[in-house]
Amino acid sequence: MSESDPHIHVEQKVMQAGADYRNLVASSLGRAPDAPDVVTTGCGLRVPYAMTSARPESVTCLACREHAHREHLRFAEQVERLSRMPGAPVAADQAAKAAQWARDVAKRFSGG
């Protein structure tokens, strides 16, 4: 962990980061997990949790932005693929919305 790193990063498990994910876990389990003090980032560094963000506009580490871009695109593809399976737990229209959201966020991480 570098104390002099001025960049804002994303967590390595970017799809499991942020308030939305913690709210999902809290509503499912009835208990909110504590945020960690230090996390591994998309670029491989370990930094204080306070130096991370799930908002593309806040992330200043280029390697983390690229990582988050790829992860959101991978999530979009995975949601679409799973929604086409027989007995899928997510309806096709819901999957399409989730995939479009992920692609929109990926685009924001790429600067596009």
Image: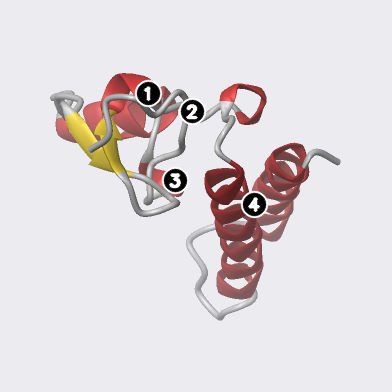
Q: Secondary structure at mark 2?
A: loop
Q: Position of residue 10 (x, y in %)?
A: 45, 38
Q: Earlier in the sequence, mark 1 or mark 2?
A: 2
Q: Which residue is mark 4?
A: 69
Check if mark 2's residue and mark 3's residue have beta carbons within 8 Å.
Answer: no
Residue at 47 percent across and 26 percent down: it is 53
Q: Between marks 3 and 4, how big is the CA–CA gap?
A: 10 Å
Q: Which marked residue is nearer to the observer: mark 2 or mark 3?
A: 2
Question: In the rendered structure, are the residues bearing label 1 and label 3 in contact, judged by CB atoms less than 8 Å apart?
Answer: no
Q: Which residue is mark 3?
A: 14
Residue placed under numbered mark 1 in the picture: 51
Upstream in sequence: badge 3 or badge 4: 3
Cα–Cα gap, marks 4 and 2? 17 Å
- Residue type indicated by callout 4: His
Say few, some or many: other residues with alpha carbon within 10 Å of mark 3 (under 14 / 14 to 19 / 20 or more): some
Q: Where is residue 41 shown, x and y percent of the image? A: 37, 45
| Residue at mark 2 | 7
Locate the N terminus by quadrant: top left
Q: Callout 3, which amino acid?
A: Val
**Residue 66 drawn above or below residue 5:** below
Do labels 1 and 2 touch, CB within 8 Å?
yes
Q: Residues within 10 Å of mark 4 (few under 14, many from 20)?
A: many
Residue drawn 55% across the image and 80% down it? 86
Element type at mark 3? helix
Quadrant of the image containing the C terminus: top right
Q: Is residue 103 left or right of residue 15?
A: right
Q: CA distance from mark 1 to mark 4?
A: 18 Å
